[in-house]
Image (spheres, rainbow, N blue to C red):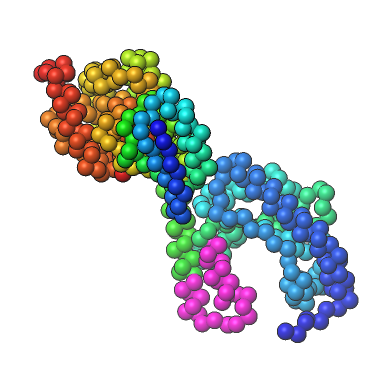
């Protein structure tokens, strides 16, 4: 699992690559949690190359959402494949994020 | 501009002002802060609080005009002036009551200009209190008015009674017509606010008494309804399948979905929960039962109730797609998701019951 963070002028994008299962979530948590510093603006969680997400992964997404809510920012989840979107739907997470 | 000449008595008053200017500035800031904290604490939202200390040139002008009537600087009550500008007329009285609690009010010199106007005249409306504090020897003035009264006063001030220039009668008449209109507008704003507050109270009472069928479905009523936690039972039931944690989120986005599904009252929403709750549970069980997902959001219950209603009413994949478009934004992927749900649901018991 890899997380690449690119900070642009208008938004910060985290590219999530691979499988965000429980061990991977533990591994990338510091990087994802660091997005809280940017949560006053727009944070994009780019899932184009995300193959799988577990409950632990969903919790990481929630951390970013909570930070954004506290700071008045927005979180965009971009490029989910059908399986990831299905997980979001099954758990009622679909309307928690701005989805593109 | 040539400086106005003052006699020795007035010069002495002006000198006393100069000697005390830092104390005036400090006191004005302290009163401003105290007022702001008090109004904030009371949850009273005002448009602005302004404060100022009279300038030396303004005081000189005042003394040149009517210096003889002041024995000392203590007789000039507006060296420190504050203004509280409210949104609603009712709030002027609430601010006044807060001011009365905070400071000693010199009633003899305070003026309620709202009461001074004759029945056939319109114009400057404001409440002026002359106040004092025990630990400060000078009095100060607090003006309280609405934003509309403030706007009118400012416009009138520019070309009106203080300008020293005689203005045509027609202009004055137009200003008075405007004052009358603003007074009516102020009254209407207050009435609308009172009506909305009254409506909210009635809705809350109806929701609390369980008369949901009488409550029209709107933002206010839906919020009150959600306070009753109408989806909690179903969410807990779904969560128990995987011993999942429930993440509480706002369910307000579902107001639009329930409306789109034909709900006109809270009773209609309640009826949908009752009618489709079991079907929603079957769908959720099928979807997460074979996964190890142990977190759900509290929006899962309303989501699955709406999906079940759409499916049972023959809305099919298109209906579900529209629902997802409504709650998470339009996307082609919502169409695929909707197709998948229709496929998942077709063998579930609720889809095969009449």
Question: Which of the 4 image quadrants contains residue B14?
Answer: bottom right
Instruction: Residue B160: tell me if it is visible.
Output: yes
| Residue located 31% across and 32% down the image | A51
Position of residue B341 relative to residue B177, above or below, is above
Magenta stretch: helix, strand or loop mostly: helix
Residue B316 image position (x, y, % from top left): 14, 32
- Which quadrant of the rendered structure holds the N terminus of chain A? top left
Q: In terms of depth relative to the viewer, which is nearer, B39 or B323?
A: B323
Q: In terms of depth relative to the viewer, which is nearer, A86 or B184?
A: A86
Q: Is residue B174 magenta?
A: yes
Counting the numbered discs, the total is 0
Residue B295 image position (x, y, % from top left): 38, 23
| Residue located 83% across and 78% down the image | B6
Residue B230 image position (x, y, % from top left): 35, 23
- Which quadrant of the rendered structure holds the C terminus of chain A? top left
Task: Describe residue B118's horizontal placement relative to residue B51 as left or right.
Answer: left
Task: Describe residue B46's horizontal placement relative to residue B320 as left or right.
Answer: right
Q: Residue furthest bottom?
A: B2
Q: Is residue B1 magenta?
A: no
Instruction: Residue B109: tell me if it is visible.
Output: no
Task: Describe residue B231's horizontal placement relative to residue B286 as left or right.
Answer: right
Task: Describe residue B126's horizontal placement relative to residue B15 as left or right.
Answer: left
| Residue located 44% across and 31% down the image | A60
Position of residue B22 relative to residue B209, above or below, is below
From which residue to which does the magenta span run?
A: B149-175
Question: Which of the 4 image quadrants contains residue A14?
Answer: top left
Q: In terms of depth relative to the viewer, which is nearer, B231 or A11?
A: A11
Question: Which of the 4 image quadrants contains residue B21?
Answer: bottom right
| Residue located 86% across and 70% down the image | B15
Residue A10 image position (x, y, % from top left): 44, 53
């Amino acid at each position: 699992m890899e997380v690449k963070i690119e900070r642009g002028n208008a938004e910060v994008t985290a590219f999530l690559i691979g499988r965000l299962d429980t061990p991977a979530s533990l591994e990338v948590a510091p990087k994802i949690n660091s997005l809280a510093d940017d949560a006053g603006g727009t944070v994009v969680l780019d899932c184009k190359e995300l193959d799988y997400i577990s409950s632990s992964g969903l919790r990481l997404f929630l951390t970013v959402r909570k930070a954004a809510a506290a700071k008045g920012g927005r979180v965009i989840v971009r490029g989910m494949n059908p399986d990831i979107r299905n997980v979001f739907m099954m758990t009622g997470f679909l309307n928690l994020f701005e989805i593109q | 501009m040539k400086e106005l000449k003052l006699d020795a008595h007035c010069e002495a008053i002006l000198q006393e002002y100069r000697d005390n200017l830092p104390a005036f500035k400090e006191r004005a800031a302290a009163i401003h802060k105290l007022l702001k904290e008090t109004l904030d604490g009371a949850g009273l939202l005002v448009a602005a609080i302004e404060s100022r200390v009279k300038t030396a040139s303004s005081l000189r002008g005042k003394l040149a005009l009517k210096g003889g009537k002041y024995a000392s600087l203590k007789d000039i009550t507006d060296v420190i002036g504050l203004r509280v500008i409210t949104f609603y007329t009712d709030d002027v009285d609430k601010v006044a009551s807060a001011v009365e609690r905070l400071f000693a009010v010199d009633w003899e010199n305070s003026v309620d200009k709202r009461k001074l106007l004759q029945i056939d005249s319109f114009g400057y409306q404001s409440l002026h209190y002359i106040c004092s504090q025990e630990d400060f020897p000078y009095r100060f003035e607090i003006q309280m008015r609405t934003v509309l009264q403030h706007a009118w006063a400012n416009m009138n001030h520019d070309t009106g009674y203080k300008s020293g220039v005689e203005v045509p009668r027609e202009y004055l008449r137009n200003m008075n017509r405007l004052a009358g209109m603003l007074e009516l507008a102020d009254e209407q704003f207050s009435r609308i606010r009172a009506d909305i507050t009254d409506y909210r109270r009635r809705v809350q009472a109806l929701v609390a008494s369980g008369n949901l069928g009488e409550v029209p479905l709107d933002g206010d009523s839906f919020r009150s309804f959600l306070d009753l936690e109408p989806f909690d039972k179903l969410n807990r039931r779904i969560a128990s399948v995987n011993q999942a944690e429930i993440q509480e989120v706002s369910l307000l986005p579902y107001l639009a979905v329930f409306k789109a599904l034909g709900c006109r009252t809270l009773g209609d929403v309640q009826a949908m929960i009752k009618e489709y709750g079991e079907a929603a549970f079957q769908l959720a069980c099928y979807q997460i039962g074979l996964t190890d997902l142990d977190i759900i959001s509290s929006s899962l219950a309303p989501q699955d109730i709406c999906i079940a209603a759409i499916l049972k009413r023959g809305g099919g994949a298109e209906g579900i797609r529209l629902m997802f478009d409504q709650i998470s934004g339009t996307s082609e992927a919502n169409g695929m998701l909707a197709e998948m749900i229709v496929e998942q649901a077709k063998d579930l018991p609720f889809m095969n019951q009449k």
